[in-house]
Image (spheres, rainbow, N blue to C red):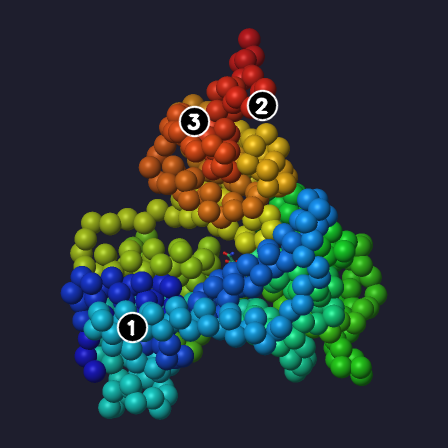
């Protein structure tokens, strides 16, 4: 098989690249070991977890209704088989849709595991009929979009399906009575939220002295408070897991070493969510010595996503942090633009990050921590949701919206939001940073009332000391 472009990996990076290349008239082959498109995000990541988080949110809202509003629905009963079926249906619908789109665009899908034999040849492993005779693809350009897999340290690998990674947790085998989440990052807190709302007694152990250490502390605080209650005060920070072992009663025994938890405890299930590793081994890169990987396994590349071989590109999780589907998608499209010879750049400055917990946390651009670390002159203007009519009506006043602004130029450097729907609201911030907005642009944009989106405008007004619903005069410069 001979092609102009081969894409290795059919996740949100790989299929976006393949589809754009085909739309632009290139002949494209996409090699995907699983045979169906979607990658981690669709098949065992973003989409199934959001389907389950939707259920979790409804359960917690009905509880809030009863507690705060006097409207009760009774205790929910959960049919786990039906729930799993529905989640799988969401995946099948979307993956089937992608398959149909690939066909319409004449993108050839080959179900195989691809390895580089040389800078122009891939060898294919597998026995699917889609594999061409001879088991090789000769290509002009290649895009590596192989993604990542959950990190699973050897000490936790005790040969029991009671110790799971995120894929196992999304499989929803049962609703365990107790579950320990190891790692208080994105995955641990999202999946912990799902299971706790389904009735599991969830505990979280985290090595560092806070949850979600990549996010600003003031954004994490309202979430940590709510999780403390959801997880029954069982969040163990600064704590190391000593050992994990099978116990005689079909449980998992875990030992802890830390100030808030010491000794051992048994759990029905344990979720390992301690990060992800790029899938760049076994790709035959040893046959291409000019392509380098760094110590974490990310493939070294330039701003155009070009590796040490000028016709081989890398995108998405295999290319480095942040390991986010939307970053992969944009990188995929950028790599294709470069291959087509278009004048193009991709600036990572405004990639939004969203943690889909309750409340959600979202940020884009420079965080306050990054601004401090890098010595960037900045001013933070924040608007508490307690002053928002919509947040009051929803009973969710713990939220906050803040802008990070360059005080000299008044240009927006970053944004952080905590509160329900923060993940939707952050789109405005990404656009503001992308467009190079000054804070007045946001303050003078009419936002509909009463919406949570208004807090974006209100926080911008705080910069000028003129927010209507809070009294916060602008500080006079010191004489
Ligand atoms: P993470 O990096 O977000 O969090 C891992 C946490 O585990 C860290 O806080 C770390 O300190 C802790 N940790 C590491 N080793 C530990 C140990 N032995 N004991 C206790 N704690 C330990 O990683 P993740 O939650 O596994 O997610 C992986 C990646 O997947 C994320 O970086 C993110 O890019 C992506 N992801 C994104 C979303 C989203 O966009 N909403 C959701 C899920 C995953």
Residue 378 location (% of width, % of height): 49, 30
Q: Residue furthest right?
A: 263
Kindly identify the residue that appears in the image at 66 percent across and 60 percent down. 197
Specify whether residue 341 is in view: yes
Q: Which is nearer the eye, 58 or 223?
A: 58
Residue in the image at 70% along x and 64% along y? 199
Instruction: Point out which mark residue 234 bears.
Output: none
Residue contact between numbered discs 1 and 2, judged by CB atoms under 8 Å = no
Relative placement, left or right, of 165 versus 122 is: right
**Crowding at label 2, few (<14), some or many (≥20) Cα neighbours within 10 Å?**
some
Determine which residue is flagged by label 1. 100
As drawn, is 334 to the left or to the right of 318?
Answer: left
Q: Earlier in the sequence, mark 3 or mark 1?
A: 1
Q: Residue at x 42, y 32 (%)?
A: 447
Describe the element under mark 1 as helix, strand or loop: helix
- Nearer the viewer's eye, disc 3 or disc 1? 1
Look at mark 3 in the image and give the residue it sits on: 443
Mark 1 residue CB less than 8 A from any atom of ligand 1: no
Position of residue 228 in the picture relative to residue 130 (left or right): right
- Ligand 1 - quadrant of the structure image: bottom right
Quadrant holding the N terminus: bottom left
**In the depicted view, which residue is nearer to us: 219 or 450?**
450
Distance of label 3 from label 1 (alpha carbons): 44 Å
């Amino acid at each position: 098989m001979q092609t102009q472009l081969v894409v290795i990996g059919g996740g949100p990076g790989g299929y976006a690249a393949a589809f754009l290349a085909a739309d632009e008239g290139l002949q494209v082959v996409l090699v995907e070991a699983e045979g169906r498109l979607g990658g981690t995000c669709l098949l065992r990541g973003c989409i199934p977890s959001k389907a389950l988080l939707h259920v979790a949110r409804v359960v917690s809202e009905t509880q809030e209704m009863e507690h705060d509003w006097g409207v009760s629905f009774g205790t929910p009963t959960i049919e786990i088989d039906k729930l799993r079926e529905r989640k799988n249906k969401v995946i099948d619908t979307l993956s089937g849709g992608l398959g149909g789109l690939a066909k319409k665009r004449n993108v050839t899908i080959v179900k195989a595991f691809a390895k580089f034999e040389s800078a122009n040849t891939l060898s294919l492993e597998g026995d699917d009929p889609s594999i061409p005779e001879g088991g090789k693809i000769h290509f002009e350009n290649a895009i590596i979009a192989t993604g990542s897999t959950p990190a699973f340290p050897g000490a936790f690998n005790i040969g029991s399906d009671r110790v799971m990674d995120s894929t196992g947790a999304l499989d929803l085998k049962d609703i365990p009575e107790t579950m320990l989440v190891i790692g208080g990052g994105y995955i641990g807190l999202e999946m912990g939220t799902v299971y706790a709302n389904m009735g599991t007694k969830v505990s979280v152990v985290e090595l560092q002295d806070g949850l979600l250490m990549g996010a600003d502390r003031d954004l994490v605080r309202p979430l940590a408070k709510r999780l403390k209650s959801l997880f029954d005060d069982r969040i163990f920070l600064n704590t190391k897991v000593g050992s994990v072992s099978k116990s005689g009663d079909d449980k998992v025994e875990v030992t802890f070493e830390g100030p808030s938890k010491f000794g051992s405890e048994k759990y029905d299930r344990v979720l390992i969510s301690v990060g992800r590793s790029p899938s760049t081994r076994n790709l035959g890169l040893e046959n291409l010595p000019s392509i380098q990987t760094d110590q974490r396994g990310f493939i070294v590349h330039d701003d155009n996503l070009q590796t040490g071989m000028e016709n081989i590109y890398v995108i998405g999780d295999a290319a480095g942090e942040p390991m986010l589907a939307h970053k992969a998608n944009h990188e995929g499209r950028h790599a294709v633009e470069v291959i087509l010879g278009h004048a193009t750049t991709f600036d990572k400055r405004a990639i939004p990050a969203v943690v889909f917990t309750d409340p959600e946390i979202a940020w884009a651009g420079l965080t306050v921590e990054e601004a401090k670390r890098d010595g960037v002159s900045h001013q933070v203007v924040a608007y508490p949701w307690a002053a928002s009519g919509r947040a009051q009506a929803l009973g969710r006043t713990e939220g906050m919206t803040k802008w990070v602004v360059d005080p000299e130029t008044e240009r927006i450097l970053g944004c952080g939001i905590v509160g329900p729907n923060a993940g939707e609201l952050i789109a405005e911030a990404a656009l503001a940073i992308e467009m190079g907005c000054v804070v007045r642009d946001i303050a003078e944009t009419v936002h509909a009332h009463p919406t949570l989106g208004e807090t974006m405008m209100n926080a911008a007004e705080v910069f000028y000391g003129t927010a209507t619903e809070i009294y916060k005069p602008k500080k006079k410069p010191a004489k």
